[in-house]
Every structure is written in C-alpha cells, then in structure tokens.
C-alpha cells in the first residue's frame, strides 16, 4: 500500500509524522496550486464545492507520484462533505484509476467495529508492533497540536513584531524544515524549537494592532490556497489574526463529541442565534463570531465556498450579530477563480474600515 | 500644484487632476480595452501637452489595476476602490449615508455614518448587473450605451426579467423580445431586475438611508437611477463627476499622503513615449507555481508582480528606484 490523502492546511506535516512512525509508504500530493485545481475542475461535477475539486487534483497528482490508496475522513452529516467519499470513489473509478479508499467515519455512523477494521487495514501495512503504532499516533497528534499552536502564535504576534515579516518567515521556515525530518521525534523537537523562537521574537507591547478573527467553512479557512493565503496577507499588513477551526480543534471536537462535551463555549455562544445543528460548521461560525467579539476583536471575516449550505445560513445570521454587537463582519465567497485583485480590494477596504472606526472611537467626533 | 488620481478599472481608465481645494480641474476618461499600460500611456500623452511634471505634487492609484498603475506612474498612495469612492463622496457631502457604486465588473454598497465607513459589501462571485453586462445588452439590442437609459424612461410599463444571473436575464430578455415586447419595456424591465438583484444581493441585510449617492460608470444610465428611486422610495443623487469618483478619491488620498512624506514619487509624463510592456512566466521555484508578471520599460525591468514569496520582487530591490530615467 502506498497511501495518500487530500491536503488540508498543515495536516500533511502531522500525517508525515504518522506514516513515518507507522512505517507506511506514502505520497504527499504537491502543495495545492492552480495546477491541482485545474485537474480537479476538469473532472469534478461542475456544481460541487471548491474543496472537492482541489481534492480530486490532489489524488490525481498523488497517483502520478505512485499512490494507490486514499485515506480520507468521512462524515455522514447534513452537508455535501458527507457525499464526498462516495462521489470521489465513483469519479476516480470512472476515470479508470484503480484506487483504494479507506474512509474514517465516526463510530456512530459505521460502528466502532468497522472503524477498528479500517484503522487496522492502515496499520497492517506498516508491520510495526502495537506499542510502536500507538507511539506514532501519539506523536502525530502532538505534531498536529504543536504546529497549530505555532501557527496561531505567529498569526497573533505578527501584529506586534518589531522586525516586519519575522513571524511569517519563521513560520514558513518551520513548516519547510519539518518536512525534512526523518522521524516524528526529530520533527517534534524542531517544531518546539521554532515555537520557542516565535515566542521570543522582539515585540512592541505598546502596539495595539487590529485584531481580526477568521471564521467560516472549515476547509476554506484552514487551506491557505483556497482562501488566497489570507492569513499570510494579514501578517503582511501587521494585523493580528485568530482562527478557531484547526485540524487539532477538529480532532479534539471529534473525540469529545460522543460524550457531547465538545466545544461547549461555541455551543453556548451561538445558542441565541442558531440553536440547532444544521450541519457543516455553521454553529462554530456563529459561535466564533460572538466569542471573538467578546474577546475584543475588531472584526471578523467569514470565508466559505460558493454553494456551501451551512455557511449560507450563517451568512444570513451574521448581519444580525453585526448589528446587535456593533461588530463588523465581512463575508468572502471563494470558488475556482484565481484572480486575486477582487479579494485584496475587499480585504484592504475591510482593514481601512476597521482602522477608521477605531480612530473615530479613540479620538471622538 | 495638482494632485493626480488614476482609477484603472476593468472597463475604463480614469485620470483626474484636482487642485489644493480638491476641485476637479482635469478629467480624462479612456477605455481600458484589456490593455491597462497603454490606457495610462494614452492618458499621459494628453496630459503631457498641458502640464509639466512639476505641476503634479502627488499621485495616487485605485481600481483593480491599481498595483500595476502605481509601478508605472510612481504613486504615493495605492488605495482600494471602496475607500477611494468613500473619500470622494464625502468631499461632495459630509452627510452622505449610502454610496451605491456600479462599475464595469464590480458593484458595491458603502454605508457611512458621521463621515466614517461603517459597512460595505461587494458583489460576490458573479458580475451580473454591472457595466459590462449592460454594455453587452446594449450592443445586442443595437442601441448606443449612452442612450440605453433614455429608452427605459420612455416605457410606461416594465416587462419582468429574471435578475438573479446574467445568463438567465439574457435568455429571459430574448424570450420576451421574441414575444413582441418593445425595446423600451424590456430595457426598463432589465433596469428593474438589476436594481432588485443589487438590493437583494449586494445590499442584503444593509439599511439604506438617504442621502444616497449613485456613482460609477453605470450611474450615467438614467433608467438605473429611476429604478433605484422607484425601489427605495426616495431621491438618489448622481454627482456631477460620477464616473471620476474613484480617481478623485485616489488623488485626495495621495495629497494627504504627500503631506506626511514631504515629496512625491511621481515619475513624470515622459513614460507616455517609452516602450512599456509586460511578460509573464510560471515560476518554478516551489510547488506554488505562481504566475509572475514582469513589467519592462525600454527593455529594463521596472517591476515584478504575482509572486507569493517575494522572490522576484525582492530581486529588483524596489522597482521604483531602479529605472526612473
């Protein structure tokens, strides 16, 4: 088995640690690019959402690199993501690829036995002892958490840094070097080292940068290619940003959800505006908007792919929050357009708006 | 001493010169025709005969081509269209509450309060209802775009046209036209549909309060103005220089910027005669595979755009300093 998986932000770093630890052969698809999107858009159903198309591009590029098995998380929730695995299996088959899919669904959907079977199928390919497998899984989870924390730190400190661009530079170097590590242990200590370096960059604590929260659909907020590298741009502008949805958040949320003790703060914050679970991460979007307002953020940007049902619902709720809390929220819809100018215009105008609001509040009128 | 503003838009390129009191002294309106560099050069050819380089004490750019424009002319300020339009509108009336701006590819709504932008929205992924679409329909009906709005005013009734999507709107228009409805009624129906689309889509969730300024190229269309007034129930004002508002705003912002920095980066009108052109290539430095654009002036590279990592922009060491002569 030569495994591959679709890209989602920094997940590839943790998966590398996992597969290295499990001793499984794998191919990481090339980073998302216009090329991957072109491949995906050519073969995917026209009306499907953007993540699907990019993922198809990932698979085909990975197959070119020798992959024969896709490992994918599933969902039987009420959003199109629930159909992804079936649709993708059919699509890849009709394109003539002999590709195995291992879909990791929630135990409540497929039963704990089936999930264990599927996990065992992955583990069997590596011929490692049970202890080694557990150790590899633990390290991978740690890597995921650490890289997410490091990234969040860099995004936040970018507003305070004295040497412009330092956070961005360190963060990108960290990711690049992590991919050169040959063992999970080496990778863990490298990321720890970089996290420390970012923690100790010279900052100006008297600065009061704009703070923007990134909310919305999970794939498009996490995967930088799909959102025009919005977080990198915010770092360039010297804006502190925060994003609640990360792969490690998703993992924790998934583990805790059977006991219904997942993301309690989000559930509580969103109750007034969206008391029901409508699929996708609509509840998280609403909850994050309220939480970031309470945490003193200046504004929020919602990002979602064209046609995303849960986020369309939250988009129509957000103006009410914006009005009630006097909290600016901008929505960005992404699709397979690669012209950036329009997005940069919106982003710059939003930052201008937040800056001018602040001047107005600070100095009175 | 004048401030210059260049609004390099998808359809038109506007150049405005304003004096110290922010009054418009010169306006040039050109069609971009897919060649932004040439449009700027053409504009500069006209200006060169009337003004000296030293007359320009500040230059600013806006519009979707603002970055390339700034590299070519040497801009003091590069600003997004929203802020530029808001600045120009506030210059006309400090109490303006809402700005409706419809250009070639974009439509926007800007909500202001006490002279501050409080909220804005732009069309999402679709350009239905913008200038390019109206242009195309005018062409199809064989009516000069300048007279398009007057036709709408001639109609007593309006034909219902689907406004959600340009493709739906067009096929609806063709069906109605083949049923024998008059051009005037169809055009009025189209204006109503586009206004409905704008208010439901771009203006969704926003409270539109008077005074409303309607600007951008489409504001020339009297049918659209009437349709907005009909739908909103109060008067909509079209400023005298409605199509120049972006350029005027950019000029005002540039003037403010030069007051801070002391001197302008403006490179002069002579670039009108130079050979400026661009070449693009796929960078193979990393898997991002950025499409990088190089701008040449007489065979010397004056700027790189489109690289994510600043590998290329870094190489020129700031394109504005390199080849100013």
Image: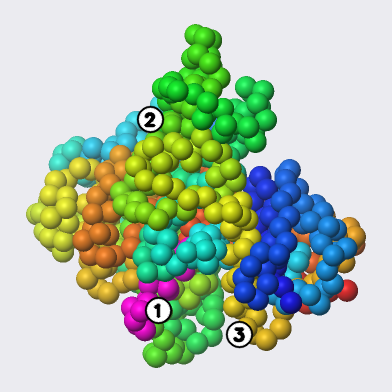
Q: CA distance from mark 2 to mark 3?
A: 58 Å
Residue under numbered circle 2:
A87
Q: Does residue A37 sit above or below B23 in this rendering?
A: above
Q: Is residue A353 magenta?
A: yes
> Label 2 is found on which chain of the structure?
A
Residue B181, given in percent of the width and then of the height, sits at 50, 13
According to the picture, the residue beneath numbered tag 3 turns out to be B260
Mark 2 and mark 1: span between their CA atoms? 51 Å
Chain ID of residue with mark 1? A
> Looking at this view, is B50 or A334 the one in front?
B50
A26 on left or right of B271: left
Q: Residue at x 69, y 61 (%)?
A: B16
Q: Are marks 3 and 1 in contact (CB under 8 Å)?
A: no
- Rendered location of residue B30, percent (x, y): 74, 49
Q: Nearer the viewer, mark 2 or mark 1?
A: 1
Region of the chain picked out in magenta, as a range: A349-365
Which mark is nearer the camera, 2 or 3?
Answer: 3
What residue lies at 46% left-to-right and 26% top-to-bottom? Answer: B189
Can residue B128 be seen here? The reply is no
Q: Quadrant of the C terminus of chain A?
A: bottom left
Whether residues under marks 2 and 1 lie with C-beta atoms below 8 angstroms apart, the answer is no
In the picture, measured across the screen, residue B118 lies left or right of residue A233, that is: left
- Count of numbered marks: 3
Cα distance, mark 3 to mark 1? 17 Å
């Amino acid at each position: 088995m030569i495994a591959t998986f679709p890209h989602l932000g920094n997940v590839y770093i943790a998966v590398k640690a996992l597969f290295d630890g499990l001793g499984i052969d794998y191919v990481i698809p090339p980073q998302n690019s216009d090329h991957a999107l072109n491949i995906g858009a050519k073969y995917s159903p026209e009306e499907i959402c953007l993540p699907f198309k990019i993922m198809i591009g990932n698979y085909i590029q990975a197959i070119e690199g020798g992959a024969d098995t896709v490992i994918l998380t599933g969902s039987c929730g009420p959003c199109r993501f629930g159909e992804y695995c079936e649709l993708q299996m059919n699509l890849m088959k009709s394109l003539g690829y002999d590709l195995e899919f291992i879909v990791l669904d929630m135990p409540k959907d497929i039963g704990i036995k089936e999930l264990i079977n599927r996990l065992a199928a992955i583990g069997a390919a590596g011929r490692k002892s049970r202890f080694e497998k557990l150790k590899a899984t633990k390290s991978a989870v740690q890597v995921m958490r650490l890289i997410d924390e490091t990234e969040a730190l860099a995004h936040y400190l970018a507003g305070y840094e004295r040497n412009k661009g330092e956070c961005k530079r360190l963060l990108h170097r960290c990711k690049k070097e992590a991919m050169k590590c040959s063992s999970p242990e080496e990778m863990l200590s490298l990321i720890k080292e970089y996290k420390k370096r970012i923690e100790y960059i010279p900052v100006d604590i008297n600065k009061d940068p704009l703070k923007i929260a990134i909310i919305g659909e999970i794939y498009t907020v996490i995967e930088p290619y799909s959102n025009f590298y919005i977080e990198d741009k915010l770092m360039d502008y010297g804006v502190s940003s925060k994003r609640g949805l990360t792969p490690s958040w998703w993992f924790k949320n998934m583990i805790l959800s059977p006991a219904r003790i997942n993301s309690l703060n989000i559930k509580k914050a969103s109750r007034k505006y969206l008391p029901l679970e409508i699929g996708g991460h609509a509840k998280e979007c609403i909850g994050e908007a309220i939480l970031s307002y309470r945490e003193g953020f200046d504004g929020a940007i919602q990002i979602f792919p064209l046609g995303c049902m849960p986020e369309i619902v939250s988009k129509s709720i957000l103006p009410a929050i914006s009005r009630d809390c006097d909290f600016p929220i901008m929505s960005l819809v992404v699709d397979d357009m690669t012209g950036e100018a329009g997005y940069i215009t919106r982003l710059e105008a939003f930052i201008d708006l937040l800056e001018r609001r602040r001047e107005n509040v600070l100095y009175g009128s | 001493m004048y401030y210059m503003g260049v609004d390099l838009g998808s359809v038109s390129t506007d150049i405005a010169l304003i004096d110290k009191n922010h009054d418009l002294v010169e306006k040039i309106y050109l069609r971009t025709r897919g060649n932004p560099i040439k449009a700027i050069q053409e504009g500069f050819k006209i200006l060169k005969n009337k003004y000296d380089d030293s007359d320009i004490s500040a230059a600013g750019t806006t519009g979707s081509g603002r970055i390339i424009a700034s590299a070519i002319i040497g801009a003091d300020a590069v600003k997004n269209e929203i802020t530029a339009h808001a600045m120009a509108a506030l210059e006309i009336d400090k109490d303006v509450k809402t700005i409706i701006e419809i250009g070639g590819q974009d439509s926007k709504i800007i909500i202001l309060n006490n002279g501050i932008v409080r909220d804005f929205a732009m069309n999402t992924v679709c350009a239905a209802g913008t200038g390019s679409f109206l242009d195309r329909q005018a062409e199809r009906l064989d009516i000069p775009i300048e007279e398009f709005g007057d036709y709408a005013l001639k109609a007593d009734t309006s034909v219902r046209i689907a406004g959600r999507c340009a493709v739906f709107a067009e096929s609806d228009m063709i069906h109605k036209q083949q049923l024998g409805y008059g051009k005037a009624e169809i055009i009025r129906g189209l204006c109503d549909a586009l206004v409905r689309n704008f208010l439901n889509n771009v203006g969704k969730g926003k409270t539109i309060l008077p005074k409303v300024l309607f600007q951008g190229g489409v504001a020339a269309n009297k049918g659209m103005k009437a349709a907005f007034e009909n739908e909103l129930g109060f008067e909509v004002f079209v400023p005298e220089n409605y199509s120049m508002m972006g350029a005027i705003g950019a000029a005002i912002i540039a003037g403010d910027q030069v007051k801070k920095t002391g001197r302008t980066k403006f490179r002069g009108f002579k670039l009108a005669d130079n050979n400026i052109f661009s070449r693009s290539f796929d960078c193979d430095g990393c898997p991002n595979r950025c499409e990088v654009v190089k701008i040449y002036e007489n065979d010397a590279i004056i700027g790189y755009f489109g690289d994510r990592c600043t590998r290329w922009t870094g190489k020129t060491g700031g394109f504005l300093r390199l080849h100013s002569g």
